[in-house]
Amino acid sequence: MAVWLGGLLLLMFPLALAQQQPACDGYEVLDGVGLPAIGTPARQLMIELDSSRVANSEQDCWDLCCSTERCELAEMSEGNCKLISCMYSGFNMCELKNKEGVRSFRKNDIGPTPTQKDFCLPEAVTGPCRAAFERWWYNPETQTCQNFTYGGCKGNLNNHIGEEECMNKCTGVTAELSNDILSPSKRMVEENVDQACSGKGVVGNCRASFPRWYFDAESQACVSFTYGGCDGTENNHKSENECRDRCIVSKPEPAKVQAPRLAATASTAQQQVQLVHAVHLSFAGTTIQQLAPVLHSLMEDAAETKTITLTRTTV
């Protein structure tokens, strides 16, 4: 009996593995992560292509995603297959959350992930559609969130559902950064800027309470703040030491300043004679042989071609 069960398990094991494989090329299976809750900021800009389809298995759900245009993410939850389009204004908006017992099926290389600048620096855009949704946009000039009417299509990411969410996302962002915005198609790596050491500490939209540290470029110091657990920035360090090690560069010791070399000119010859005279007075009664090493040390940087004749006098 045990042998028979063992053989059955061996036959079933490859089938189980096969069910976890991507249904088509260019996709990956992610364990333990899934869609954020409906109504949360992270879910706001994900477009649900078809939430009513019933699939018999995860594999059927993934197959549906492969055959559906614009489907970049699929999740099987409570018997419903959710097909999601992640792209909005050229950005990948599918920010997945930890979700126990869930596997997601996602397309690789969907597009660039938006940064805090993309959410906080563009001006408000109503769009060409004629709906009327009250939204909030962050004004980096005044560093406040202001309401506006959104038409329902072709907006940008500075489009927040509420004032509180807007401020949590953008507090500390200034207009000085507005010239640095690049479109997704022209997004390039920002040279010489460490994102873990720029901007302010962002609490985020979640309600946890984690003690964290951010680097304040103005004061060149690490400052403590409370992180809510999501939608933060890279300037979010677990300890002050970690923050300092990453962002505060130790200054090198200043270079030793050497005395200027005296050129072998007629103008310095007189200085050399005066130097010898001063040494002569200080070492009166000393023999030339005893005095020579001292003079050699004092005048080693003097003129290369000039020589000074020493005479011993009695004081």
Image (spheres, rainbow, N blue to C red):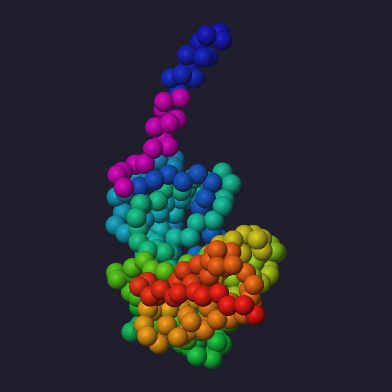
Q: Is residue 16 magenta?
A: yes
* Residue 56 pos. (x, y %): 44, 41
* Residue 13 pos. (x, y %): 46, 25
Which picture quadrant has residue 22? top left
Identify the residue at the far bottom of this view: 142
- On the picture, is 74 further left or further right than 205? left
Which picture quadrant has residue 282? bottom right
Q: Is residue 38 magenta?
A: no
Q: Is residue 249 above or below residue 308?
A: above
Q: Please identify the quadrant where the N terminus is shown.
A: top right
Q: Residue at x 45, y 30 (%)?
A: 16
Residue 135 visible here: no
Q: Nearer the viewer, residue 164 or 275?
A: 275
Q: Nearer the viewer, residue 218 or 32?
A: 218
Tell me where the magenta segment starts and ends, as one range: 13-26
Q: Residue at x 59, y 67 (%)?
A: 287
- On the picture, is 280 further left or further right than 19? right
Q: Residue at x 49, y 74 (%)?
A: 310
Which picture quadrant has residue 152? bottom left
Q: Residue at x 56, y 44 (%)?
A: 101
* Residue 95 pos. (x, y %): 48, 60
* Residue 299 pos. (x, y %): 49, 72
Residue 314 visible here: yes
